[in-house]
Each structure stands twice: as structure tokens, then as C-alpha cells.
Image: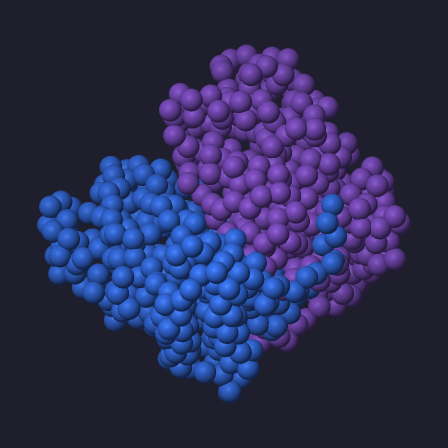
Chain colours: A purple, B blue
């Protein structure tokens, strides 16, 4: 048995769970509170309100539910898509396959448009598919954590709206909320789903989803027709009254919320939205800091002769970087050398090229708290490690 | 907006989320770790192993999933009961209705045998129902948090096994694991489902379920027949390889586990099973401490002339007490007076009698850490408050 009190600090730059601010860890150790306590109710209410602020939406309906980001897929599949209806999944990596699998589980006819590895689905292909038949939803992954590919959310939403105005636009933004700019209302999105442990800077354990009033209308029509929801735990019919109650300052019960994590999430949202102190960057400045850090790492990788997964620079995420190993270099060569320098990064995840690339996360405090010098450390350690490997293997540049 | 760093300590005796040990809060503030880190893997593995120890089972399969206790119902409904199959729910309070609702959502034909408020379903009624038709599962709530009624799990399992040997025995033990003795193998149970925030003494956010090898066999047969699972997030097909991997010391990914909460849960399991120190009570001693504390509170309530919800003393939970208000006394009279004395308890939950009773939780550290004197404080405050109310209202004894 391991001793859980023997804590080992492990600084890391993986694309989630990311390192979180001390204020967030402190809040996660909040003494136990009742989920119906007058002290807890406004904290939960604030988290609901602040998520609208982070996504620049006036009236989308947030759902904050105990669970991982994956639970967001179940919410979409079980509440919005009726059995037999068509769903179109734009595939830019591992998470497209999984979302399609989830949609099928609840009876949707899910089809995928697959981009080549490192690419996105061309908009004209999307438009053609939408003309060929009626789709209830189009889903896409804003940043696919397996490839680091960033999709153009605004352009995808525009294309869907112009060809098939009633099709709901669903964005898996697990790896992009608070590290990429997302304009929920301006871009006319219908669902943005995410989780607590990436750009939102809290420990894992919270599924976060915002649904447009258009999406809520579709859900209500379904209920009016008597089509049952496909899930109990992910049922909006169960959760909507709870979210409304806490936002209005009342307690309500369906299932116990993760009280401590809600305190931690609130602490992180206060940092992200600048509520916690007057010295904090605005949301816009935060996005800029992510773009700058990303650019530094990507330029350094290019200078080292490394090739990135995203085929186009404009389609590369700002919160993570996915890089191919150079010829004759493997994960076993590079990752342990980085660990020795105090840098923990992640291996590959995309099943077709799992062993051929690695991933660096640069979201949240590793980017915003510049005094940590995380970006410098990553860049320097990567260069030194590759040089060591060349020397050890006798590779000439 | 509330300030999340302005913590208010709120000692309470509600039936969950219960107060947790300092070691557990400390572990919940563990620095962020990767879910595939070599340091985290054995911690998760230990939690899986320790849950078998807590439930006295040799080979039941644990599932530890980010979510609330409610997610355990979805696991049963979506993995074990095929659409159209019969499910029999023994109703001893609020949570019977909810479990039946969940089973119906996934297509089961769910029927309830309802006990009167404060009672349990007589075993001969259960036997008759089992003879009348074929049920895939019988479910019951070990301790219904809405009534404080304790069901006789051993006798229910024996009855099911003698009349209908292939029917799976499913126990909702959210409010009983680690406060009531449960002998998974000896009693021949098939599913025990629970959550982290009650007797298990950790913050909320973890759904915990153990399935017998008989139940796993039924699930495998279903898969072999090609009957799809009804849920994606609650799919055992997705989670089983993950649980096996972590138990074997390997990382695997389906959805990100609640890493910090797993550290906290491990800290609590170390306390509960006596691993954390040689001075800790054994599991058996822990159950005895719960019985003793419960007896003290229940005797005191009786001495104060108060009537409890459970109709028979042998069917009253040992981790909580549900008590009717005396005539002419309301929640608005009693609860604020208790709060002034530093005692936070819970109101009613059972929809038919919501305003007529209150609930006291006595699980975990409030019982085991006797130096806290929680039980004394609750008893003294209850007596004093009732006396104050009598005097204020001019009620003569």
C-alpha cells in the first residue's frame, strides 16, 4: 500500500489535469459543507453565472454536474438527439471517434467526416454533407487533445447556420475553454461542453456544459412530444430545476454536487475572470498570454527542426503543442531525460501514431503566472535533451 | 459575488456530506497530478483493493467513477437490466421511487413493493412477488436517507436466493457503507453501490459500485448476445479495463478520474481500515462505535418523548436518526435554535411528511473521534432547544 500523506510535488506540462493555483487547492480543502447550506448555495450560483462570463453568453443555460468531461457527450446524446436521428461528427482526432460512439449508444445515426491526421474537415465537405440529409446536430472538437488541432468554431457554426439553420452546433471544448477565445453568442453556438481540469484550472471531477436557448427549445419540444430522455444521471429534466434553484439562491436536490470541488472551481473562476484581485489579467489578456506562450514553444520546436502534428499553423491549439519525435528518437529516449530536468510531458494518444509524437500542455498558471518560467524551462529542457540524445546515439545534425 | 477564500467552518451532523478527517481534507489539496503518473496509479489501485476489504469480499469487481452516488443506479440499469426485463424495487423511502425511475429510463419494467413510511417490505411479500414472475434484479435501499430505515440485507438476499436463484440482488448502500456492517460475500449480494461522502468519509464526487462475479457474468452474457449497454459514461465495457489496469499497476484512459478526490478517498480508506495508524479502531470496532452512538441518540430522543420514523427499533439505521417533531413544534422552531448551539442537522426529505420530521447524521469522525463529543453536544442541544420551545410557546409537558 502506498501512503497517501507522502505527497510528491510533480510539476508538469501535460494537457490536463493541469497544475492549479494554490488558492484553488486551498479551496478544495474547504471543510465539509452541506450541499444545502446557505453558505454553499451562492458559491454554486456564482459558478453558474461565471461560466456565462467565460464564454461571453447572455442567456445560455449552464449544467455543472459531478463527473468527467465525457459526461457532456452523454448529455448531448441523451437529451438532444432522438433515437434514429442523424448526427454528423467532424473528426480531427481521437475524441471524434469517442463522441460518435457515445451518440450511437443512445440510438443516434452517427456519421463522421474524417480529416487527415493534423487537419480539419474542409468547410465545403461539411456544407455538402448538410445538403445531403437532415442532421439534428453537428459536433466537432474545438481542440482535439490527441492532435493539438484547433478547429475554426466560428466558421463551422456559420457554415451550419447558412446551409441547415435548425441543425444544432455542438462543440467539445474540453481542451479549449479559458485557453482559447470562445464567443458563444457571437458565433451562434448551441452547446459548449467542457471539464474542470484543463484551461479552467481546477481539479478534475466536474462536467460543465452550456446550452443555447435554441438547444433548450429543442429539448423542450422533445419532452412535449413524449420522447423520453436516454439517461437518468445525465437528464436535463432532472438537472435544470437544480441549476435554476442554485442560481436563484435556493437549494434543490437531485444528486449531491461535489461541494469541495465547487469551492475550488469558484476560486479558479475568480482568478480567470479577474474577480479575485485587481492585478489579474482580463479574459482577453489571458487568451493573449496563451497565444504568446504557444507561439514561443512552437517557434522553438521549429527551430529545433521538429515537425508538429497540425498541418496548418492557424489550426494549432494555443493551450497545447503536439510534436513528432525526430527520426531515430523515441519516447523512451526523450521523456525520461525531460523528467530528470523536472519537466513532465505527455506521450501520444492518437491510436494511429501513438508512439510517434509527444504533447506539451501550456494552459492556466503555467502560462499566466509568468514568474514560474514554465515556458522557458520546457523550451530549454527540450533542446538540451534532444542534444543529449544526438550525442548518445551518435546522430549528426 | 461571494468570496470563496472566506471559509466558514460549519460543524454539522447531517446524513451526508459528513464532516471528514483533516487527513482527508489535506489529501484533497494534493498538488495536481497526472492521472497516468506512476505516483497516482498505485493510489487508485489501493482504493479499488480497499473497497473489497471494507465490504468483506474476495473477488467482487469495484467501479470507482467520477460522479455522485446516483450514477450507481445508472450503472445497474444500463449494464445489467435489458430493456423489457422486470426489475423489482423494495421501497422503504424516497430513494426507492428514484431508483425505479432510473430503471424505467433505461427500459426496464420496474415495479415497486412499497412499505408504509418507517417500515420495510415483509419478506413473504417479496417471496410472493418473486414467485409470480421472473425478475432480473431485486433492488433495495440498505439505509434510506429519507427515513433512516435499515433493511435486513442478509434476509432479503436469502429470500431472493431461495425463491429465484438467478435474480440479482442489488443494494443501494449510499447511506450505509462503513457505518453499517456489510458482508458482501457471506450475504451473497450481487451489487453494492455507494458514494464517497457518507460513511466512507470523503468529499462528494465519487460513485462507488462493487459487482459480484455472478453479476459480471450476467453482464458478459448480455454483451455476448449483442445487447448494447444503455449508457456511454456508465458503461462497464468502457470502465472495466480501466479498473483492471489501475489495479494491476498500469494507467489506462477512458475518462479522467477525479485525481485529487482519489487521494482524499485513499486517506479516508486508510483511516477506516486501520492502515493509517495502529491506534485506529478495526472495521468491526467502527461498526460497534456507530451502533453505540446511534443507541445513545435514539435513547435520548425516546427519553425526550420523541417518536422516530422507523417503526421497529431493529430496522433503524446506525448512522443516522430520523425523528418526528413533537406536536406544535416545527422545523422553524427547532433548527435555528440548534444552529445557535453549533449543531446543524437536516430537515425532512420524504415527500409525504417532509415538514413533519428531522434527521441527525452520526457517521464517520463524529462517532469515531470520540474526543469531539459530537454525540453529547447533539443530545444536550436537542434537549435544551426543545425545552426553550416549550417555554416560549407555553407548552406544558
Left or right of A207, for residue B111: left
Could you tell me which quadrant the N terminus of chain B lies in? top right
Please state if B113 lies on the left or on the right of A260 as rendered.
left
Residue B191 coordinates in the image, percent (x, y): 32, 58
Q: Is residue B136 above or below residue A155?
A: below
Q: In this view, does A102 lie to the left or right of B161?
A: right
Instruction: Choose top left, top right, bottom left or bottom right for residue A155.
Output: top right
Is residue A88 in view?
yes
Q: Where is residue A105 in the image (x, y as percent from the top left)?
A: 41, 36
Give whichever of B322, A311 is nearer the camera. Answer: B322
Count of marks, rendered view: 0
Q: Locate residue A264 relative to residue B96 in the image: left or right.
A: right
Above or below for B122 versus B247: above
Viewer-proximal residue, B129 or B208? B129
Quadrant that contains the C terminus of chain B: bottom left
Q: Residue drawn 57% across and 37% down?
A: A244
Which residue is pictured at 58% across the width and 22% down the height?
A: A214
Does residue A170 lie above or below B98 as drawn? above
x and y, in percent, of residue A257 in the image = 54, 51
Q: Which residue is drawn at 55% across and 12% down?
A: A131
Residue B40 placement: quadrant = bottom right
Is residue B236 in view? no
Q: Where is residue B297 in the image (x, y as percent from the top left)?
A: 41, 72
Kindly identify the residue that appears in the image at 47 percent across and 45 percent down.
A254
Amino acid at each position: 500500500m502506498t501512503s497517501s500523506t507522502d505527497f510528491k510535488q510533480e510539476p508538469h506540462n501535460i494537457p490536463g489535469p493541469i497544475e492549479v493555483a494554490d488558492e484553488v487547492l486551498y479551496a478544495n480543502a474547504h471543510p465539509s459543507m452541506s450541499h444545502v447550506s446557505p453558505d454553499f448555495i451562492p458559491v454554486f450560483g456564482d459558478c453558474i453565472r461565471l461560466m456565462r462570463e467565460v464564454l461571453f453568453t447572455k442567456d445560455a443555460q449552464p449544467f455543472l454536474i459531478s463527473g468527467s468531461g465525457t459526461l457532456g457527450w452523454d448529455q448531448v446524446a441523451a437529451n438532444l438527439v432522438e433515437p434514429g436521428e442523424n448526427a454528423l461528427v467532424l473528426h480531427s482526432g481521437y475524441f471524434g471517434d469517442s463522441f460518435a460512439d457515445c451518440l450511437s449508444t443512445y440510438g443516434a445515426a452517427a456519421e463522421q467526416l474524417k480529416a487527415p491526421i493534423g487537419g480539419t474537415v474542409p468547410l465545403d465537405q461539411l456544407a455538402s454533407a448538410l445538403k445531403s440529409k437532415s442532421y439534428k446536430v453537428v459536433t466537432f472538437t474545438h481542440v482535439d487533445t490527441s492532435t493539438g488541432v484547433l478547429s475554426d468554431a466560428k466558421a463551422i457554426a456559420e457554415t451550419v447556420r447558412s446551409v441547415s439553420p435548425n441543425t444544432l452546433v455542438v462543440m467539445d471544448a474540453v481542451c479549449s475553454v479559458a485557453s482559447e477565445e470562445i464567443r458563444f453568442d457571437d458565433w451562434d453556438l448551441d452547446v459548449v461542453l467542457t471539464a474542470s481540469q484543463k484551461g479552467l484550472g481546477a481539479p478534475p471531477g466536474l462536467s460543465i456544459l452550456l446550452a443555447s436557448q435554441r438547444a433548450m427549445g429543442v429539448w423542450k419540444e422533445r419532452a412535449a412530444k413524449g420522447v423520453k430522455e436516454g439517461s437518468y444521471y445525465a437528464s436535463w429534466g432532472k438537472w435544470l430545476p437544480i441549476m435554476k434553484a442554485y442560481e436563484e439562491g435556493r437549494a434543490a436536490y437531485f444528486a449531491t454536487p461535489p461541494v469541495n470541488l465547487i469551492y475550488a472551481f469558484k476560486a479558479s473562476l475568480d482568478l480567470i475572470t479577474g474577480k479575485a484581485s485587481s492585478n489579474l489579467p482580463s479574459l482577453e489578456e489571458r487568451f493573449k498570454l496563451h497565444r504568446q506562450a504557444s507561439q514561443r514553444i512552437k517557434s522553438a520546436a521549429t527551430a529545433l527542426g521538429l515537425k508538429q502534428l497540425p498541418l496548418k499553423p492557424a489550426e494549432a491549439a494555443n493551450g497545447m503543442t503536439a510534436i513528432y519525435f525526430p527520426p531515430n528518437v523515441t519516447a523512451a529516449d526523450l521523456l525520461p531525460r525531460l523528467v530528470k530536468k523536472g519537466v513532465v510531458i505527455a506521450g501520444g494518444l492518437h491510436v494511429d501514431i501513438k508512439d510517434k509524437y509527444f504533447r506539451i500542455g501550456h494552459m492556466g498558471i503555467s502560462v499566466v503566472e509568468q514568474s514560474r518560467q514554465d515556458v522557458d524551462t520546457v523550451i530549454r529542457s527540450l533542446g538540451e535533451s534532444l542534444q543529449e540524445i544526438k550525442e548518445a546515439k551518435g546522430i549528426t545534425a
